Amino acid sequence: MFRLTRVLTKAPQRLKQARLSQISAPRVSVQHSFYRQRNYSDVSSQHIFTDYNNENTPFEFSEENEAKVKEIIAKYPKGFQKSAVMPLLDLAQRQCGNWLPLAAMNKVAKILSIPEVHVYEVATFYTMYNRTPVGKYFIQMCTTTPCMVEGGYEVLDALKQRLKINLGETTKDKKFTLIEVECLGACANAPMMQINDDYYEDLTPETAVRVIDQLEKGEQPKIGPQCGTRRAAEPAGGLTTLTEPPTGPCLKPGLFD
């Protein structure tokens, strides 16, 4: 008991010393290729300065996005504009080609008149923000239990072979980045993947590769289920109930045509 008490009483002091050592540690600047490998260890709060991503890198919202910034901020009550941090970061990321440089975070902080660290806290917490460059098509393959059971890893292997890259890597032409993610909330349509904003569901190795082939050709693949037997998340074997279109003024005309 005495030994445990000594450890507990020393813990806060050791923690304080560790924090001070981190604060006083010099900043590290490491040169990387622009599209460097994206490992799970990259998803941390540490920022590594590079020649293309540092606090002096210029960033300004485009004229079109400046108007969107004002529109977004106007949605929040006076005094609560800082709540716009997430949509503004998303807007900045889209402008930068699906990744979020440090300069863009600093710009958002300046616009909202909040400390930069508050923006960093958001950007490092949510995985929707890519703090390193990714390809034009950012592929997130789900391998959580439903997708795994339905063949998610077979689909993932097919994507690796088709793209000739491993997890966390980007193709040489900078078109595709492939990562493995946890549940994306389309379990009824497992296995599935998300590419940028779009969901591709009910995949097989063949249909997943077909989606990639179409994107590579500059075509827009059909979004949603790829099985050809359902439009959304209805039973894969066909409807057993509610087989007739519902009626009522709440439905848009032609919704079930």
Image (cartoon, rainbow, N blue to C red):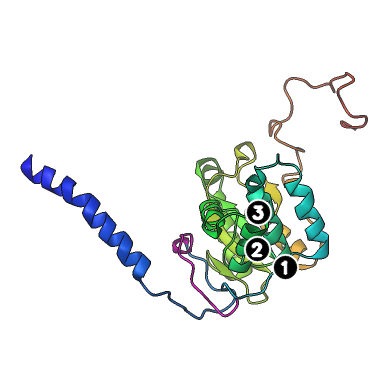
Q: Which mark is residue 112?
A: 3
User: Is residue 223 visible from the viewing direction of this image?
Assistant: no
The residue carrying mark 2 is 107
* Mark 1–mark 2 distance (CA, rounded to whole Å): 7 Å
Highlighted range, magenta: 40-52
* Mark 3–mark 2 distance (CA, rounded to whole Å): 9 Å
Q: Residue at x 71, y 41 (%)?
A: 76
Disc 1 to disc 2: CB gap under 8 Å: yes
Q: Amino acid at mark 2?
A: Lys
Main SS, magenta residues = loop
- Give the secondary structure at mark 3: helix
Residue 31 spot, x, y in % from top left: 50, 81
Residue 61 spot, x, y in % from top left: 74, 64
Q: Earlier in the sequence, mark 3 or mark 2?
A: 2
- Give the secondary structure at mark 1: loop
Taking 154 as reference, is 176 left or right? right
Q: Quadrant of residue 219?
A: bottom right
Q: Residue at x 63, y 45 (%)?
A: 83
Quarter of the figure that contains the C terminus: top right
Residue situated furthest left in the rendering: 2
Query: Are there few (<14), some (14-19), or many (20+) residues within 10 Å of tag 2?
Result: many
Disc 3 to disc 1: CB gap under 8 Å: no
Quarter of the figure that contains the N terminus: top left
Q: Residue at x 75, y 67 (%)?
A: 216
The residue carrying mark 1 is 60
Q: Amino acid at mark 3?
A: Leu
Query: Are there few (<14), some (14-19), or many (20+) residues within 10 Å of tag 1?
Result: few
Taking 221 as reference, is 179 left or right? left
In the image, residue 188 above or below residue 12: above
Is residue 174 highlighted in magenta? Answer: no
Residue 181 spot, x, y in % from top left: 54, 52
